[in-house]
Image (cartoon, grey):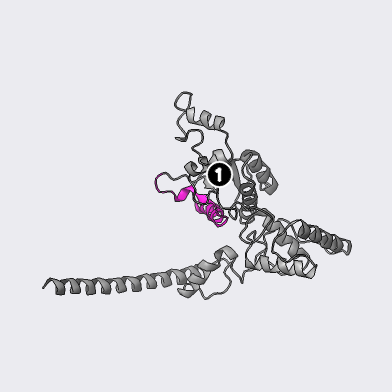
């Protein structure tokens, strides 16, 4: 059988998410696309829950048939505030759900965390491997008290630096389609900010780095002109990768890895061969051994100092 269509996974997920916060929907849209392009079929099983739905779930195994599935009463789940989703993987055809927390499952979680979600699999007391929440570290108690995550986390306002998700991805594709050299990864970093400001400057717009109505209107005009001129737009659902440059969200970790000697600093997005993995593992091993020896020396020096003071 053929692989389930990406659009099918998106439609199922949007239907199951219900009335989640727009930023959650926007980021999950990009996550579904990115994971699909990486060979992973992801589907969202739930999103927003009303208090009455939460009460019904809480009653299960207590006052109604079934087993207990949650300890959260109405108002005690992040789902009740539209800031959380649960996900699972499917088989290749999209006909069966799989709940094995494997490498693919964790890859979804890692990309979710890059999009500013917190992953339930990182929790210490109760690990919820299917759970992603966009709370900026706030608890359900904070949300119940009326607090909300920072605007930058919730993509407040027009697309701008710090945002991430499908809207940013579409902006990047539009800039690429009219001739700018830009990676379309869905993360509005310094590169996207610089290119958008260049577009604004070249078209007599306010150079503010905000993809507002004026910029959108001008972008449509330019793209329409290109279409009339016969220029073909690039594929919409392709996450464009420049293998020689790390994504904005990974730059800090990539630079640190280079400084520690784990990589030579080239092709950050290329897949690794087994021999390259062996090199990295051995470099890590040498660094750990060096660190251990340094700690041993510090411990010996400390013991000698304690013995000297005790005499």
Q: Position of residue 214 (x, y in %)?
A: 78, 59
Label 1 neighbourhood size at 10 Å, few (<14), some (14-19), many (20+)?
many
Relative to residue 37, is residue 87 drawn left or right? left
Identified at 55% across, 54% down, the residue is: 116
Residue 17 or residue 244, whichever sits in front = 17
Dominant SS type (magenta): helix
Q: Assign a secondary structure to mark 1.
A: strand
| Quadrant assignment for the N terminus | top right
Query: Does the segment drawn in magenta span residue 107?
Result: yes
Instruction: Tell me how many marks there are.
Output: 1
Image-quadrant location for residue 236: bottom right
Give above or below for 285 relative to 23: below
| Quadrant assignment for the C terminus | bottom left
Q: Position of residue 176 (x, y in %)?
A: 74, 65
Which region is colored magenta?
101-125
Identified at 55% across, 64% down, the residue is: 250
| Outermost right residue | 228
Residue hosting label 1:
84
Give above or below for 104 relative to 280: above
Identified at 40% across, 48% down, the residue is: 124
Query: Does the segment drawn in magenta span residue 207?
Result: no
Q: Position of residue 100 (x, y in %)?
A: 50, 46
Relative to residue 180, is residue 288 drawn left or right? left
């Amino acid at each position: 059988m053929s692989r389930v269509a990406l659009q099918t996974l998106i439609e199922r997920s949007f239907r199951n998410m219900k009335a989640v916060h727009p930023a959650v929907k926007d980021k999950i849209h990009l996550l579904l696309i990115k994971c699909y392009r990486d060979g992973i079929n992801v589907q969202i099983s739930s999103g927003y829950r009303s208090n009455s739905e939460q009460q019904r779930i809480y009653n299960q195994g207590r006052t109604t048939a079934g087993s207990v599935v949650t300890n959260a009463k109405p108002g005690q789940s992040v789902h009740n505030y539209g800031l959380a989703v649960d996900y699972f993987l499917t088989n290749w055809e999209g006909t069966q759900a799989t709940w094995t927390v494997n490498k693919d499952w964790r890859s979804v979680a890692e990309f979710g965390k890059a999009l500013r979600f917190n992953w339930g699999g990182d929790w210490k007391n109760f690990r919820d491997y299917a759970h992603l929440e966009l709370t900026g570290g706030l608890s359900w108690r904070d949300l119940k008290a009326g607090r909300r995550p920072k605007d930058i986390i919730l993509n407040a306002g027009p697309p701008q630096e710090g945002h991430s998700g499908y809207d940013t991805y579409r902006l990047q594709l539009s800039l690429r389609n009219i001739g700018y050299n830009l990676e379309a990864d869905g993360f509005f970093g310094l590169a996207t900010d610089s290119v958008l400001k260049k577009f604004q400057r070249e078209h007599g717009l306010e150079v503010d780095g905000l993809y507002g109505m004026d910029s959108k209107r001008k972008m449509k005009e330019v793209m329409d002109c290109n279409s009339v001129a016969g220029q073909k737009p690039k594929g919409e659902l392709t996450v464009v990768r420049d293998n020689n440059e790390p994504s904005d969200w990974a730059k800090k970790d990539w630079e640190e890895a280079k400084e520690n000697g784990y990589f030579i600093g080239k092709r950050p997005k290329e897949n690794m061969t087994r021999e390259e993995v062996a090199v990295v593992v051995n470099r890590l091993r040498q660094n750990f051994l060096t660190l251990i020896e340094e700690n041993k020396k510090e411990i010996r020096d400390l013991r000698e100092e304690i013995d000297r003071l005790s005499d």
